[in-house]
Amino acid sequence: MFLDELNCQIDCVENGQEFLDKISEQDQDYDIVLMDCQMPILDGYEATRQFRQQEGNQKHTIIIGLTAHAMESDRQKCLEAGMDDYLCKPFMQEELLDLLQKWIDFSKK
């Protein structure tokens, strides 16, 4: 609902495999992907790894990992999987907005 209020176009999936299927069937590029790390069937870490392989060097889609784990090693695990940033759940709307603004500004440079 918060992202709708910001006039963001949103697509949702239930798991990492659905994400990969949706990405491969659409001709649409995404500015930012919010990737839950703990999903059934294919978790966010592996979905990100596979997506980065498919994406290659042609484009770089910003992926923000969302996880309930707050240790520095969890952040590192997100980055090693190919995510660009990390947000620990639960989070405040302001935290998400700050992170989105950081990467939206970055992607326009």
Image: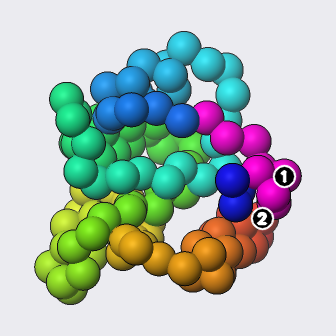
Within 10 Å of the Cα at label 1, are there few (<14), some (14-19), or many (20+) other Cα atoms? few
Q: CA distance from mark 1 to mark 2?
A: 18 Å
Identify the residue at the far top of this view: 25
Corner quadrant of residue 29: top right
Q: Is residue 10 magenta?
A: yes
In this orientation, does residue 44 appear? Answer: yes
Q: Residue at x 27, y 69 (%)?
A: 68
Position above or below: 108 against 23: below
Residue 19 in percent (x, y) is at: 43, 31
- Residue 49 seen in render: no
Q: Could you tell me what secondary structure mostly forms the magenta stretch?
A: loop
Q: Secondary structure at mark 2?
A: helix
List the residue tagged with mark 1.
Answer: 7
- Residue 51: in magenta span: no
Secondary structure under the numbered disc 1 in the rendered image: loop
Residue 45, percent across and down? 24, 50
Q: What residue appears at the point 49 percent right and 54 percent down from the top-left corner?
A: 34
Residue drawn 41% across the image and 51% down it: 35
Q: Is residue 92 left or right of residue 45?
A: right
Q: Residue furthest front?
A: 1
User: Residue 108: which disc?
Assistant: 2
Residue type of the residue flagged with mark 1: Asn
Q: Which span is picked out in magenta?
A: 4-11
Q: Residue at x 71, y 66 (%)?
A: 104
1 or 2: mark nearer the eye = 1
Q: Nearer the viewer, residue 41 or 32?
A: 41
Name the amino acid, label 2.
Lys
Q: Quadrant of the C terminus?
A: bottom right
Mark 1 / mark 2, whichever is N-terminal: 1
Q: Residues within 10 Å of mark 2 (few under 14, many from 20)?
A: few
Q: 53 above or below 45? A: above
Residue 20 in the image: above or below residue 31: above
